[in-house]
Image: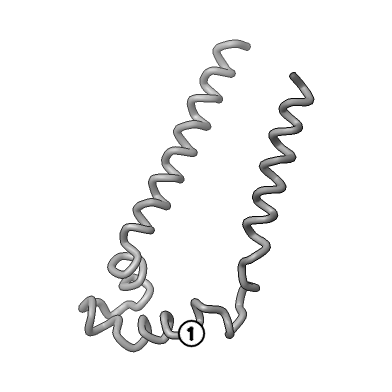
């Protein structure tokens, strides 16, 4: 059983390495996100969203569902940690 856990961990690590190998280098000006998308956000944020702050416009208006999803993931991870630690404290 101990080796099965390591096999799952190694498989997960391999999948994560493979999944991130196709990502662009952070800060690369030739990356797809640095092209037309960011230019559109900068040029049209105020008139599309009626928000002066561009960061708020992008996070709340353009990427609202994505931000909600990220918040849900963090909430779920926190809840899982609390439940695991509470169970661990009861068994000690």
| Mark 1: secondary structure | loop
Q: Position of residue 81 (x, y in %)?
A: 52, 32
Q: Position of residue 79 (x, y in %)?
A: 45, 33
Q: Residue at x 76, y 31 (%)?
A: 6
Tell me the quadrant of the picture where the C terminus can be found. Answer: top right
The residue nearer to you, when weighing 45 against 13, is: 13
Single out the residue that lies furthest toward the top. Answer: 91
45 relative to 20 in the view: left or right = left
Q: Position of residue 45 (x, y in %)?
A: 30, 81
Choose top left, top right, bottom left or bottom right for residue 11. top right
41 relative to 30 in the view: left or right = left
Choose top left, top right, bottom left or bottom right for residue 9. top right
Q: Position of residue 18 (x, y in %)?
A: 68, 55
Which residue was labeled with disc 1? 35
Q: Residues within 10 Å of mark 1 (few under 14, many from 20)?
A: few
Tell me the quadrant of the picture where the N terminus can be found. Answer: top right
Against 63, residue 31 (above or below) is below
Q: Residue at x 61, y 78 (%)?
A: 27
Task: Count up the numbered dots.
Answer: 1
Against 32, residue 1 (above or below) is above
Snapshot colouring? one colour
Q: Residue at x 23, y 80 (%)?
A: 48
58 relative to 88 in the view: left or right = left
61 relative to 17 in the view: left or right = left
Choose top left, top right, bottom left or bottom right for residue 13. top right
Against 5, residue 40 (above or below) is below
């Amino acid at each position: 059983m101990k080796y099965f856990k390591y096999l799952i961990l190694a498989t997960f690590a391999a999948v994560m390495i493979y999944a991130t190998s196709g990502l662009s280098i952070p800060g690369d000006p030739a990356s797809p996100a640095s092209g037309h998308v960011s230019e559109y956000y900068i040029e049209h944020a105020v008139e599309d969203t009626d928000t002066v702050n561009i960061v708020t416009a992008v996070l709340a208006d353009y990427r609202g569902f994505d931000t909600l999803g990220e918040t849900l993931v963090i909430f779920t991870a926190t809840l899982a940690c609390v439940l695991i630690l509470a169970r661990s404290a009861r068994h000690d």
